[in-house]
Image (spheres, helix red, strand yellow):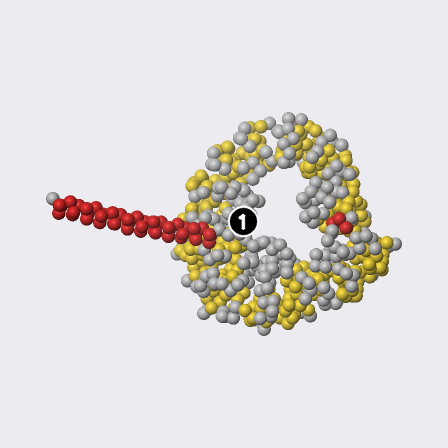
Amino acid sequence: MKNQNKKERINKTFIKKIVIILLSIAIVVGAAFGIFKWMDYAKKNYELETITEFDYYTLVKEGKTGVIDKQGNVIIEPEYNAIKIPNPQKPVFICIYNYNENSGSYQTKVLNEKKEEIFTDYEEVNVISLKEIVSEVPYEKSVLKYKKDGKYGLIDFEGKVITKPIYEEIDNMPYKEGELKVKKDEKYGVINMKGATLVECKYDSIESDNYYSKENQYKLGGYIVGIKTEEGYRYGYINAQGKQILKNEYNKVYRMNEIEDDQNIYLVAEENGQAGLYKNGRMILNHQYQGIDYDDLNGVLILEKNRKYGVSTLEGKQILTIEFDNATVEGNYIYVEKDNQSFVYDINGNKQDTPKYKNILATGNENYHITIDNNDRYGVVNKNGDVIITNKYYYVEYLFDQYFIAGGENGKSGVINDKNEVIVDIDFDVIQKLDNCDMIQTIKSEENILELYDKTMAKVVEMQNGKIQINDQYIKVYSDTETKYFDLEGREKENTEIFPNNTLYAKQENGKWGFVDKDGNVKVNYQYDKVTEINEYGFAGIRIGNEWGVIDANGNIIVEPVYQFEDQVSEPEFIGKYYKITSVDGEAYYSEDVN
């Protein structure tokens, strides 16, 4: 009996040890899995770097390129064919030299702010240019691609390796900053700037679906992926989370990008010439249509089948059967033809007599709707449907509060209110609302007169040959002879209020310009035909005749007026003795070349 009890105790102890070991293993495995999931999440979630200010600019002199800092100091002498600055807040400069115009070949090296060559362990280091993205800095701003042993990988700006050199190609994924299209073993995939795989390298083609929303921009766009078969390419679709929701079975796939819906993906897929519609991978309309078109105003589909037309909802519910010879949606009505007869239906499929309006447009203000009658004349009704502005205008656009832009038969525009009263004469070639504030500008082209009106439609400025510059906190209106500043409410401000940290301020007296301090004491005599304010870098432009020069924040002359700027759209900007040039693709650089 004692031996049996002892044996039982040993067995229980052994079992406890086994349980403890198994629990320990489970905890370790669970923790490891959790860490792995967290690391995967961290690699797939990141913030794109935002450039708040520029510390470095490219310098162009007599066809050669260098680098200056924001004080105007030369960091890299202008001796290279080109220099690319992928992040103007970081001293990493891709210098291109020995460029062969015939072959397109060149060499690169990377320099820092001390003119030291860095990243020398690689055959080549270069920027990754953005594609189909408008940006003041048209490159990936956190990573570079390097070449080693004939293959490419990613490094950051400190030289830390993000991916091994395993790719034949690395390029920006069009429309998607931070995502990179890569080629490995002759197949394409997608990684992000942290090296995380978003789409495996197993496709013969990958394209962005180009989806854009105001809130997330291109972030939630997916990928149209293709594989090559004996019958040609077959396409499928992968969503932004990397899940394939359409197999590679279709001759063509595209997303209905007119539908701004971050939660749902609507795809048209064609199979043997027959189109179908899918929502998040689930079939809504089967493959029997030659055309599926979306009307984004009313959210309906115009369907074509065997040269007949009908209309359905976005969810596939029939509105009009496919029996008509033609079908179009204009405004809030569906116009169809059958057997040489024309019919009109509302957007729900109810047959209509000739409607009073062919279109009723929302304005963003529930109190007003813009109407378009059958003669293409515009008016406005209130939320009860009562006419408050008769349909006599050639164009109406809602502004704000109770105001509307109205276009007359002479092609001129003005402003009316909701009582059909003309507030600003219908006599202007251009009327438009300013961004970020409730103000409008008007332009008379022949006289070249610019006017600004505040939110009460009171005129705040009128300027011959005027130009306008809208900033985050103020509006600048200027010409060759005068400059005025306004806050975003339309109140005129002194330059001392707009630039409180400056030590000198532009001032005009007797037709000439100079600079005074905050107390109004003259520091630079009134001798110039025009000047600019001291800019954020501590420099201002001074003009005599058609030639510009530069002074610093203390009024010292850096360059006597020698620069001439033909077709200058805005006032020139300077850093030290260098003037700013903006290329056609939006990149800014500086020069001291005299025309």
Label 1 secondary element: loop
168 or 149, which lies in front? 149
The structure residue drawn at horizontal position 59% and vertical position 33%, both measured from the top left corner, is 332
Q: Is residue 327 above or below residue 3?
A: above
The structure residue drawn at horizontal position 77% and vertical position 66%, both measured from the top left corner, is 559
Q: Residue furthest toward the front?
A: 2
The answer to which image quadrant residue 77 occupies is bottom right
Badge 1: residue crowd in 10 Å (few <14, some 14–19, many ≥20): many
521 or 331, which lies in front? 521
The answer to which image quadrant residue 355 occupies is top right
Quadrant of the frame with the C terminus: bottom right
The answer to which image quadrant residue 534 occupies is bottom right
Question: The residue under label 1 is which amino acid type?
Answer: Tyr
Q: Position of residue 155 (x, y in %)?
A: 50, 62
Q: Position of residue 336 (x, y in %)?
A: 56, 34
The residue tagged 1 is 218
Q: Is residue 470 above or below residue 55?
A: above
Q: Is residue 174 left or right of residue 515?
A: left
Q: Position of residue 209 (x, y in %)?
A: 50, 49
Q: Is residue 189 left or right of residue 357?
A: left
The structure residue drawn at horizontal position 31% and vertical position 50%, both measured from the top left corner, is 24
